[in-house]
Amino acid sequence: MFEITRIENFSPTTFLWEVRAPEIARAARPGQFVIVHCDETSERIPLTIADFDADAGTVTIVIQAAGKTTLDMMAYRAGDRIANIAGPLGQPSEIENFGTVVLVGGGLGVAPVYPILRALKIRGCRTIAIIGFRNESLIFWEGRFRDYSDELIIVTDDGSYGEKGLVTQPLKRLITERQIDRVIAIGPLVMMRASAETTHPFNIPTMVSVNPIMVDGTGMCGSCRVSLGDEVKFACIDGPDMDGHLVNFDELIIRQRRFVKYERQSLQLHEKKCQK
Amino acid sequence: MSKIEIKRTLPAHLPPQTRRHDFNEVVCGYTVEEAVAEAGRCLQCKKPLCITGCPVKINIKEFINFIAQKDYKSAYKTITDANLFPSITGRVCPQEKQCEAACVLGNKREPVSIGHLERFVGDMARREAWHEIHGRQTLPKKAAVVGSGPAGLACAYDLAKAGLTVIVYEALHLPGGVLTYGIPQFRLPKEIVDSEIENLTRLGVEIKTNSVIGRIHTIEELMTRFDVVFIGTGAGYPMGLAVKGDALNGVMSANEFLTRVNLMHGYDFPRYGTPVGIGKNVAVIGCGNTAIDAARTAMRLRPDNVYIVYRKRLEDSPARKEELRHAQEEGVQFVCRTETKEILSDAEGWVSGMDCLRSDEGSSASFLLEVDTVIYALGTLANPIISRTTPKLKIDKGGYIYTDKDTLMTSIPGIFAGGDNTKTQGTFTTVIHAMSTGRRAARGMLEYLNFSIEE
Ligand SMILES: Cc1cc2nc3c(=O)[nH]c(=O)nc-3n(C[C@H](O)[C@H](O)[C@H](O)COP(=O)(O)OP(=O)(O)OC[C@H]3O[C@@H](n4cnc5c(N)ncnc54)[C@H](O)[C@@H]3O)c2cc1C
Ligand SMILES: Cc1cc2nc3c(=O)[nH]c(=O)nc-3n(C[C@H](O)[C@H](O)[C@H](O)COP(=O)(O)OP(=O)(O)OC[C@H]3O[C@@H](n4cnc5c(N)ncnc54)[C@H](O)[C@@H]3O)c2cc1C
Ligand code: SF4
Ligand code: SF4
Ligand code: FES
């Protein structure tokens, strides 16, 4: 069993868990993820490691309540325990002095960008972060981002804070105006696709973090397959970081709907439970 | 000799009409009378050929004789000298290719039902808790076992019995490997696997689940904390279908399907959170044990049709004969000599059918198989996590770990490997083979540590 040591609510549907898992905390690197399996009846779901502290023995995950499993997770309180957490999984992000790097985070994708940003900054990159939210109330970790960004651009869909619009607008501006050596984009699939399409004509290496549906996270089931150019890759062992210019996003978007019918059924069950 | 019954004694089976819709074990197992009767068919040959057919050389003649004399405890002792898990192997060994294929009775009559007898003894031992915990010595050495499939379990067992401190690291949240996530309940009830694992923990073995080695600890890190390491990570990486449409919604690997059902209890969705996601007409591509398990499991989720689509003839199937028969009885439809050319898509990216090509002597014909779900069971490869994170580990082109033939030591001193991840040309990937390599590696490890092994 693994103890949830701290919970922080960012908005009514987004929240942070700090979980005691010393061995994972010691081995974790930016870009990796964990699989959380709260109790015997719940699903195994992948969540990116948003931070890790080897001394405290904790890993941090930031969760968006999207369906049954993640909504159920909102009922946990600090001090509660979950049955299983496995990790760190996936390949760590490449951390080198690439020169000037733009890190783009959209919505919840802001959280997994953070450890990569920090590592790149420490490694000597010049870092420009663009983080986007639907509105001001959803913004989190602005301070953390400031600490490690040479420049920080915040955008909101409705303009309630920072620039109004989508993350791709400042991204486009930056890559046309200056020498950018690498772009890292993490967020919803459509946002990652748009970012990759923005940088493609400029030939700027662009890494995205793909999030297909997973089961084991160990390369055993193939659920997480992603078409990368003409190759088939498994996101859990070859990724989740992948070359954004090669990822077949259309396929990925369709594949994320593999279980929609069942997700709706699950959601109804969750709602029934809540009414009781 | 004329007294010997031609036909073997068959244990009771659940009727196909009911069992195809539930997960209860299909083969009921011998009663005491049935077991004794079947044991009585054994000729007690001077040269018991049956033993040559068993990969671990159980003294079959002797254990059967003990059953005939109703001395079941001695039968258990005889079996477990060579094979630690008779309840499991009695159920899943391809006996018709191994021990029973070699039994002389098979020439004119049906061979002795060695598998069912072995299972009978194993099950009785479990019920009566004969499993003994040896008053054992403790040796000042530590071993790490990576993977808790049959290879890892057998290795851990022997190392613990010899007195080593053993920790088993398992990637998933439950131990057992394929026995847990792959082979379905109706063939190998989970209680049996659980009870074997419990015996192991009673021997003092610690099992750490959720531990993907190569990620949470590298093999090199384990080497600094343990005196010897065994890698039994299996070959679970599913080979792709590589036809047009293989990424459509409604296409999945047998591993994914079986894991969703077995490990995650998907058959009990939504009470359990993991959906299975099969439709009304299911095609399983392939015809090995995995394909048959997938097809029979699919059957139990009550679709309209389940097809096995197989490139070759039914006789060529490498699956256990008993399982092929059970699948037919349960209504699985076999579409043989048929290749899948393409998986067709509807407008939203879901499977809408399969374009097939059937070849009979000299002629061939295309046809459309109307299915909404395609499960592929085309074999698996070694998982690459360990080899990628252990550069010094020598592997072959297929990603399988190279080991010394006798000791099963890998290219790194002190690190051993066995089971499906060490597959070499011409070797089998079976549960008993994995167990026997696990035990051989344990012997190799003890020799490496300079401990003499009791025979
Ligand atoms: C490598 C990886 C890292 C991830 N990191 C995070 C993270 O840090 N924080 C976070 O909140 N989520 C993350 N996700 C997504 C998260 O795993 C899913 O949101 C979760 O599985 C949904 O489960 P559910 O039962 O609550 O919802 P479901 O009922 O399964 O689905 C509800 C909705 O979520 C969508 N959905 C389902 N699976 C995914 C998925 N894999 N990715 C995106 N959307 C999905 C469905 O299309 C549906 O609209 C990550 C996914 C992957 C593969
Ligand atoms: C569906 C199916 C049906 C089968 N039916 C039969 C049958 O009837 N009879 C028969 O004899 N054989 C059968 N087989 C084959 C048999 O199951 C295998 O040959 C056998 O299980 C191999 O054992 P193993 O210990 O090498 O590996 P596995 O059983 O695959 O176990 C490996 C274990 O290692 C774990 N692991 C992997 N990587 C890591 C890592 N990096 N760190 C930690 N743990 C890791 C895995 O999660 C797994 O639990 C079947 C196989 C399948 C898939
Ligand atoms: S272990 Fe398998 S092959 Fe050997 S006797 Fe038992 S059932 Fe037959
Ligand atoms: S070969 Fe057959 S008949 Fe002879 S001892 Fe073995 S099981 Fe008995
Ligand atoms: S999640 Fe199963 S192979 Fe990647």
Image (cartoon, coloured by chain):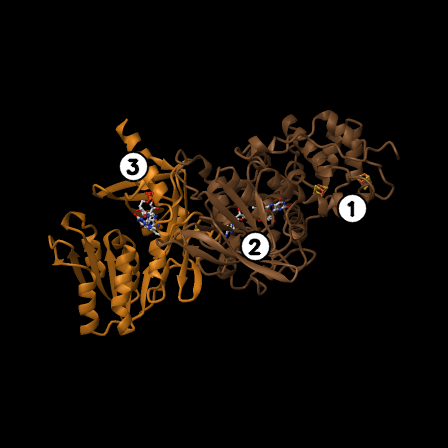
Chain colours: A orange, B brown
Q: Quadrant of residue B423?
A: bottom right
Q: Which residue, given by chain and number where applicable, does mark 1 sit on?
A: B102
- The residue labelled by disc 3 is A78
Q: Amino acid at mark 2?
A: Gly
Same chain, marks 2 and 3? no
Q: What's the distance in space between the residues labelled 2 and 1, CA to CA?
A: 27 Å
Q: Residue at x 37, y 57 (%)?
A: A240
Q: Judge from the rendering whether residue A165 lies leftward or rightward of residue A228; answer left or right.
A: left
**Looking at the picture, how far across and down is residue B131, in whole percent?**
65, 32
**Which numbered disc, 2 or 1, marks the residue that appears first in the sequence?**
1
Front in this rendered view, residue A65 or B297: B297
Q: Is residue A20 left or right of residue A131?
A: right
**Residue at image x 74%, y 29%?**
B35
- Whether residue B127 can be seen here: yes
Q: Do callouts 1 and 3 point to residues on the same chain?
A: no
> Which mark lies nearer to you, 1 or 3?
1
Q: Is the residue indicated by label 1 positioned so its CB lies within 8 Å of ligand 4?
A: yes
Q: Which of pointers 2 and 3 indicates the residue nearer the eye?
A: 2
Residue A229 at x, y percent in the picture:
40, 66
- From the viewer's perspective, tell me whether residue B160 is left or right of residue A177: right
Q: Pinpoint the chain carrying mark 3.
A: A
Query: Where's residue A5, x and y in %?
Result: 31, 40
Q: Nearer the viewer, residue B244 or B435?
A: B244
Query: Helix, strand or loop at disc 2?
Result: loop
- Amino acid at circle 1: Ala
Distance from disc 1 to disc 3, alpha carbons, whole Å, reads: 62 Å
Q: Residue at x 41, y 57 (%)?
A: A235
Callout 1 secondary element: helix
Which amino acid type is marked by label 3? Ala
Bin the neighbour count of mark 3 within 10 Å (Cα to Cα): few under 14, some 14-19, many 20 and up: some
